[in-house]
Each structure stands twice: as C-alpha cells, then as structure tokens.
Image (cartoon, rainbow, N blue to C red):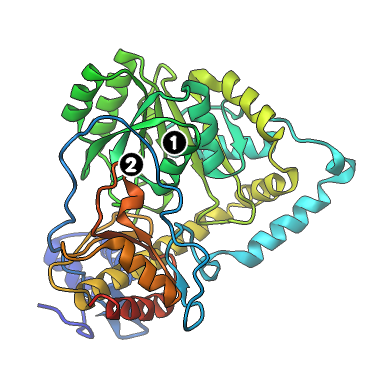
Amino acid sequence: MLRVGDRLPSIRQLREAHRISAATAVACYLWLERQGYVRARPKSGYFVARTPAPEGPAPGITRRVRGPVSVRVSGLAPAGVEPARGPVIDMGPAAVSPALLPVRRLNRSVRLALSAFSDHAVCYEDPSGSDRLRRQIARLMFLQGVTCTADDVIVTSGSTEALHLALRAITRPGDIVAIESPSCYESLQVLESLHLRALEIPHIRHEGMDFAKLEAAASRHRLAAILTTATCHNPFGDCADDGAKARLVAFATRHAIPIVEGDCFGDLVFVPPRPRSMKAFDTEGIVLHYSSLANHLAPGFNLGWVHPGRWRAQVRHLKSLTNVASARLPQLALAEFLESGALEAHLRDLRAALWRAVEAARNEVLRTFPAGTRVSQPEGGWVLWVQLPESFDGAEVVARAAAEGIIILPGIAFSANGQYRNCIRLACGHPVDVLVPAIRRLATLLV
C-alpha cells in the first residue's frame, strides 16, 4: 500500500512490469500528475502526492414519482445576510473563482476586440449573434459529436437566457416538463418564471433519468418537454453513458417530446475523452441543446448559446423580442479567445485544478462532517452534493453558514417537491487553500 511521499516505480520498471511502451508509461504518470496524485522531482522520479478519496455510500435519491407541481423555489438561496465575521467564501453559485480564470488573456482579447470595432460599435448585432463567434461555437460542438454550422447556433446572454428561450419556444404556461430529481436550482427558477409545472423523475448514476419511470409518467401525463443534463449532471456530477442518451433521444423522437439538454460542464469531465452530447444522437432536430462558457471562463462576458434544432426560427424571434441581441463587444472578445486556441490550455489547467479542489473538499467533508454524512463523487465540474444525517435541516445549516460568511445552497432548492431537506450543495470552484478552511469552519456549525 503506497503512502504519501513514497517513491513510485521508474519508467523503465513500469514498462517492464506491465509490458507497455515508454511513451504509455510517461503518459500515465503525466495524467496522475495533472490530477494531483503524484509529483515529479527532477532526477529523482515520481512520488505519491495524494491518495484517492474514499468512496463511501452515495447520497440517496428519491425513487417515488409524484404528480406534476408548480415550482416554488425562489427565495430558497441565501441573500442579504450580513456575516458576523466578514465574508469568507461563496460556495453557492456554480461559478469558478477568478483566481482560476485566465484573466490577463481575456483582457487581451477585449483589447483586440475593441480594435475590430471600427464604425460598427454603434450598431446592433444580429439577433443570432456574431457570425465569427458562432463559427467557433460550431467547432466546439463538433468536438462533442454534433454536426452543425454557424447558422444553427443562436448566441444568448448566458445559459439562463438560452434555457429561457428554448422553453418559451416549446411550452405554454401550465405545461408539464419532466425534470431530473434532484435538478439544477437555476433550471427550476426558469420553470417557475414561465409558470410551468415540473414532474420529477429520479436521477440514476450513469443513466440520467430513470427511463422506466419516465415512460410510465409519459403514459399518464402529456409532457411538453424533457429537461435534462446528461453530461456532468448538476448537482451529482456524473455522466450518462451513450446508450442511455441514445435511448432517451429515440424515445423523445418517437413520442414527439422535445428534449432541452443543458451541457455547460461537459468540457470539465476529469478523465478524457469528453463525453458526447445528447444532441449528437439527434437526427430529427428534437433536441434543443444549450451551453455556456460563462461559469468557467468569462463570467463578465455572460455569453451562452442554444442549438434549437427544428425550433430555430421561433427561438431567434424570441431572442429579438427579448433584448434584440447580445452585446457585440463580449462576443468579439470571446471569438478572439477561441480562435487563438487559448481555451484548450485553460481547460487543461482548470480540469486539474478542479479535480484537486473537489477531491480535497470531499476528503475534508468525509473527515470533519458528522458520522453518516454521504457525499457525491463527481466525474467532472466542481459541485458536491452532501447528504447530512436525517436530524439535520439543510435550510437551517445554510442560514447558520451565511451568518458566518459561507454561502451554500440547501437541498430543497433542487427539488420542485421540496425533497432533499437534509442535503446541501457545495460549489468547490476555489483554490484548495481557500476552500478547505471554509469547509472546516462549516463543519463546526454542524452540531
């Protein structure tokens, strides 16, 4: 059993023991180094830097499917609380700390975009967005297994507007939308704002929605849409396999039920390759795919996009009615950043940093939280879903934490039915030396 500080076999020893090439052995150690498990010392070899977190039992998920309900989640997130000891850390919104973002490179992109304005600075952008940016987005989607052109994409002001436009194009107030349980808090807020009813379907690790329960629900209710995050689910962080994605698309196509697919964190799956989007299995335009780089690249640009499939005309029209078009300068700046190839380097570094942060946070929760606590084991992204023992009320924990300057979200904010009362979500997109002390302080409140 290797311990932290132990020396690992040399490249030659690894090659001879496992009958692999030197290149494969080096690649294995480089991967382990990026994840923070090993550390290279010049002329000395590789040494254990960190041991994997214990798995432990996964948080429980409700298996019961209740009827559709009106969504009432607004106000469940802490706001306006004055901390007693000054602000410590915000682990509420799923946004990466500026300390992990390429700020200087983004500033350069803004300067270069300004030079491209000329006399067009006073003009509105096309409602679909900058053609230059849409070409880059189409290239990103190609890497997800989706064949599309710039004309298929509509640029939005973040992922929230993208989801809002997609749902407005395919639903009316009072319609029923099937969602995963637990589901993303921001998605539930959009459903609430559009006066849509939510039908919660249990989430199964590596499968997404419980397909049998979705089929049964569709036979009893008229579903206007299916809302899902099949890649890097929020809040569990797991990815549905290709078979589950293809099966859901085939089901939706057969029953003419639009799928609204969020895929904002797929690029942050820790172990390559990047999973294919559900849109990659769509041949009939039944999937409205939306995404964004805002949370983990440039929050200040606040840009997202939607590939609406057969509803492109409706979404483009709604975009023009909502705010005419997204601002032109951020679009040009993001296009320049993507054209330069800087995104690939940023994502490579960010994945390693988030892996270390999530692992450190998970270890600290398991070490310091009350006995019986269960924690998710994400495959990507930077959020942890924590199930506390039954005696705890997540909303009370959130209020106590806010008073100490630690912002987190309660589990009930991720359920239209008010489930997961003893759960909380932690957004861990911070440097480890900032994150771990905050979790230790949070643990002291769980008494």
Question: Where residue 390 appears, x then y in whole percent?
Answer: 16, 61
| SS of the residue under disc 2 | loop
* Spot occupied by residue 159 in the image (x, y as percentages of width and height): 52, 43
Of labels 2 and 1, earlier in sequence is: 1
Residue labelled with disc 1 = 191
Is 338 on the left-hand or right-hand side of 46?
right
Near-viewer residue (137 or 206)? 206
SS at mark 1?
helix
- In the picture, measured across the screen, residue 351 lies left or right of residue 81, that is left
Q: Does residue 346 appear left or right of residue 205 in this picture?
A: right
What residue would you read off at disc 2?
416
Residue in the foreground of this view, choosing between 130 and 42: 130
When asked about the image quadrant of residue 224, the answer is: top left
Q: Check the image and report above or below for 173 versus 118.
A: above
Q: Amino acid at mark 2?
A: Ala
In this view, 305 is above or below 252: below
Question: Which residue is at a point 32% across and 39% down the rendered structure image?
Answer: 230
**Image quarter of residue 77:** bottom left
What residue lies at 46% left-to-right and 58% top-to-bottom?
Answer: 93
Using a 10 Å C-alpha cutoff, classify the residue at mark 1 as few (fewer than 14 neighbours), some (14 to 19) or many (20 or more): many
Circles 2 and 1 in contact, beta carbons < 8 Å: yes
Q: Residue furthest left?
A: 1
